[in-house]
Image (cartoon, rainbow, N blue to C red):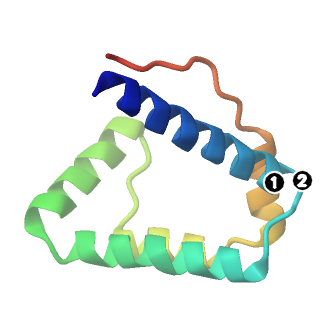
Amino acid sequence: GIGTDKENFKKAYDAILEQLELCKKGEITEEEIAFSKKFIVGILKQTADNQHHIADFYMTGILAGRVLSPEEYIKKIEALTKEDLVRVAQNITLQTEYYLS
């Protein structure tokens, strides 16, 4: 039901905020960073292997004004350091919370 959906949304939202706050404080392990990089790189490799997804990928890049190939994104992700991630996290602020019922 709708009540359950709202409860699940709230739990997920709170968990994401908690993880973001930990990252802002630098409380993120090298293992977590390595796992996240591997996960994102895997998605980018799958994208590069699928014609429909690669078209969407480049269209999004064009609209954002930053066109990089999946391979270029992979290199950038692999080069990220813990300090880079903490710095980016510290600049993230959530403006508004929306939930449609």
Q: Is residue 94 left or right of residue 69?
A: right
Instruction: Characterize the local packing of mark 1: few (<14), some (14-19) or many (20 or more) Cα atoms within 10 angstroms.
Output: some
Q: Are marks 1 and 2 in contact (CB under 8 Å)?
A: yes
Q: Residue at x 34, y 17 (%)?
A: 100
Give the quarter of the image for residue 11: top right
Residue position marked by numbered label 2 in the rendering: 25
Give the quarter of the image for residue 95: top right
In depth, the one of 5 and 83 nearer the eye is: 5
Query: Where the N terminus falls, by quadrant?
Result: top left
Please state the horizontal and vertical placement of residue 65, each as a whole percent of the image. 41, 40
In depth, the one of 15 and 49 nearer the eye is: 15
Please state the horizontal and vertical placement of residue 81, each as a whole percent of the image. 76, 72
Residue position marked by numbered label 1 in the rendering: 22
Secondary structure found at label 1? helix
Q: From this viewpoint, which residue is outermost toward the left?
A: 51
In depth, the one of 13 and 36 nearer the eye is: 13
Please state the horizontal and vertical placement of residue 79, each as a whole percent of the image. 66, 77
Secondary structure found at label 2? loop
**Picture layout, residue 80 above or below residue 12:** below
Query: Where the C terminus falls, by quadrant?
Result: top left
Give the quarter of the image for residue 35: bottom right
**Picture layout, residue 86 above or below residue 42:** above
Q: Residue at x 64, y 38 (%)?
A: 14
Q: Is residue 38 left or right of residue 48?
A: right
Q: Residue at x 46, y 70 (%)?
A: 40
Q: Amino acid at mark 2?
A: Lys
In depth, the one of 28 and 67 nearer the eye is: 28
Q: From this viewpoint, which residue is outermost toward the right?
A: 25
**Picture layout, residue 100 above or below residue 78:** above
Q: Amino acid at mark 1?
A: Leu
